[in-house]
Amino acid sequence: MKLALISDIHGNRAALEAVLADIEARDVARIINLGDCLSGPLDAVGTAEILMSLNLPTVLGNHDRQLLDRSAEEMGLWEAWIINDLQDHQINWLKNFQRIVTYENTLFCHGTPDSDEDMWLHTEGPQNRMVNRDLSGIIERLKGTSAALIGCGHTHTPALVRLPSGPTIVNPGSVGVPAFADTRADPPFIHQMGSPDARYAIVEKVNDTWCANFISVPYDPAEMAALARTKGAEDWARALETGWLA
Ligand SMILES: [Fe+2]
């Protein structure tokens, strides 16, 4: 049974449409959304309407949570861009998301089971660049989880780790944001995939082992980049067009 893992759409409706069209052709039994659906200077409303119509099992991302539990004055920039565009029924839809989604022997979360902001497979390395987390740090975050397959998002970085103790952990990467800079860190925490493609993964058990097919879907980012520019987010526009920040 193939499962499609999508994550970190961040309001990129064009990338979501491209990924959904790609999934359509691949005989997938279920799509699971690992969160951070709307926040960013793009098309939060259009993205919400598509996702609401699909009614996917969805994990609550840190940015979804921030849309729910912060006042407009206190929320982050990525939420401030869209909070006034969203209607009550779209905000209320976010309340259905779960911190953890489980099926049989599988578990899905945004960051880790304990935190929607923790990075499971990655960490900040020298100069605040994202690097792979070491084995002990990954195992520590299992916290007794017995699932054979774990899906997580949040870092926008596709990865598969199979632990010596058994579980396979998959991060499908980001559907909508191929590069970003968090300027709250000094130096800024920078992530860039190096291509503008929308990323997702299909996972499947083959001979009793969970495997992942990491897929990059080219699409036309022009409309989303133009939206970012109307909100003054030139760095987002460049990232969407190229997958690089500068
Ligand atoms: Fe996130």
Image (tube, grey):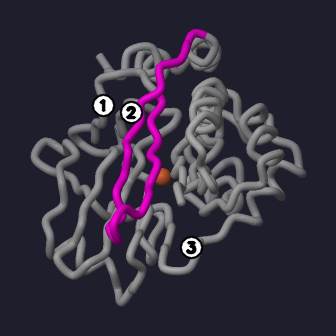
Q: What SS does tag 1 mark?
A: strand
Residue 138 as seen in the image, left or right of residue 197: left
Amino acid type assigned to the residue bearing label 3 in the image:
Ile
In 3D space, how far apart are the residues under numbered discs 3 and 1 (Cα atoms)?
27 Å
- x then y, percent, for residue 239: 41, 21
Give the residues in magenta.
198-222
* Dots 2, 1 in contact, CB < 8 A: yes
Q: How many labels does the image show?
A: 3
Mark earlier in primary sequence (2, 1):
2
Q: Where is 30 relative to 104, above or below?
A: above
Element under disc 2: strand
The answer as to whether callout 1 falls within 8 Å of ligand 1 is no
Tell me the crowding category of disc 2: few under 14, some 14 to 19, or many 20 or more residues within 10 angstroms, Cα based. Answer: many
Q: Which dot marks residue 243?
A: none
Question: Which residue lies under the disc numbered 1?
Answer: 192
Image spot of residue 227 (x, y percent): 64, 17
